Image (cartoon, helix red, strand yellow):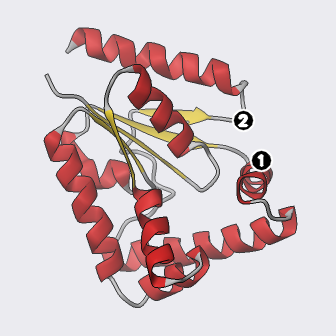
């Protein structure tokens, strides 16, 4: 039976990291909405913040990413990560995971990943999140703070990465065996 796992959460919670890990471990495909967004930004010669601003006025960017997310969920045997992955996959998802972490931890991770200062990462991340929250509410009527659609909520700052990964693998393994 095809399996669909979504991993959502704020920026810097480890969505792509854990999605890749689970996809590799269970021989599933991996699709990243964030990576699609980055590719669009690069193709347009824009920063993530600039594309976020463009997307707040042009719903086509989100529609493109959302359509791809839905299409990949339809195909099955995939781990999809993205802020709206759980919402877009809907009832096609067998397991919807929401990752969280304290703001300071998230910003520190982003600063390290993007090789920028903590202050730069903080300003960019918080501005981007404010714009996205408003945009998703306006376009979809959804509140990103409503995590009631998720089957599992994990604080990725609670344990070392290896332990969090081990826990997620065990949960997915159990799901696979019950399918």
Query: Which residue ends up furthest to the bottom in the rendered image?
Result: 57
Residue hosting label 2: 157
CA neighbours of label 1 inside 10 A, class few (<14), some (14 to 19), many (20+): some
The crowd level at tag 2 (other Cα within 10 Å; few <14, some 14-19, many 20+) is some
Query: In which quadrant of the rendered view does residue 2 lie?
Result: top left
Task: Please state if 87 lies on the left or on the right of 9 as rendered.
Answer: left
The quarter of the picture where residue 141 lies is bottom left
Residue that appears at 86% across and 68% down: 119
Question: Residue 48: horizontal and vertical position, in percent?
Answer: 57, 74
- Residue 72: where, in percent of width, then height? 22, 48
The tag earlier along the polypeptide, 2 or 1, is: 1
| Disc 2/disc 1 C-alpha distance (Å) | 7 Å
Between residue 88 and residue 17, name the one nearer to us: 17
Using the image, determine if residue 67 lies above or below residue 48: above
Q: Residue at x 34, y 48 (%)?
A: 86
Where residue 49 is drawn, which disc sits there? Answer: none
The residue carrying mark 1 is 105
- Estimate the x, y position of residue 1 in percent, counting from the top left: 13, 22
Q: Is residue 72 left or right of residue 148?
A: left
Quarter of the image where the C terminus is located: top left
Q: Helix, strand or loop at disc 2?
A: loop
In the foreground, 165 or 102: 165
Residue at horizontal 69%, vertical 70%? 126
- On screen, residue 80 versus residue 121, left or right, reads left
Q: Secondary structure at mark 1?
A: helix
Which residue shows up at 43% across the image and 82% down it? 55
Is label 2 in contact with label 1 (beta carbons under 8 Å)? yes
* Count of numbered labels shown in the rendering: 2
């Amino acid at each position: 039976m095809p399996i669909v796992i979504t991993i959502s959460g704020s920026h810097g919670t480890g969505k792509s990291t854990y999605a890749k890990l689970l996809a590799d471990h269970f021989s599933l495909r991996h699709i990243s909405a964030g990576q699609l967004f980055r590719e669009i930004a690069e193709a347009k010669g824009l920063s993530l913040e600039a594309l976020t601003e463009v997307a707040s006025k042009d719903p086509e960017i989100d529609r493109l990413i959302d359509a791809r997310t839905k299409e990949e969920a339809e195909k099955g045997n995939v781990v999809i990560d993205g802020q709206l992955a759980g919402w877009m996959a809907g009832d096609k998802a067998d397991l919807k995971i929401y990752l969280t972490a304290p703001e300071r931890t998230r910003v520190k991770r982003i600063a390290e990943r993007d090789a920028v200062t903590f202050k730069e990462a903080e300003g960019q991340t918080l501005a981007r999140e404010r714009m996205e929250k408003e945009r998703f509410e306006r376009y979809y009527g959804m509140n990103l703070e409503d995590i009631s659609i998720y089957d599992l909520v994990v604080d990725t700052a609670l344990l070392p990465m290896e332990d969090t990964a081990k826990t997620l693998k065990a949960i997915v393994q159990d799901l696979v065996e019950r399918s």
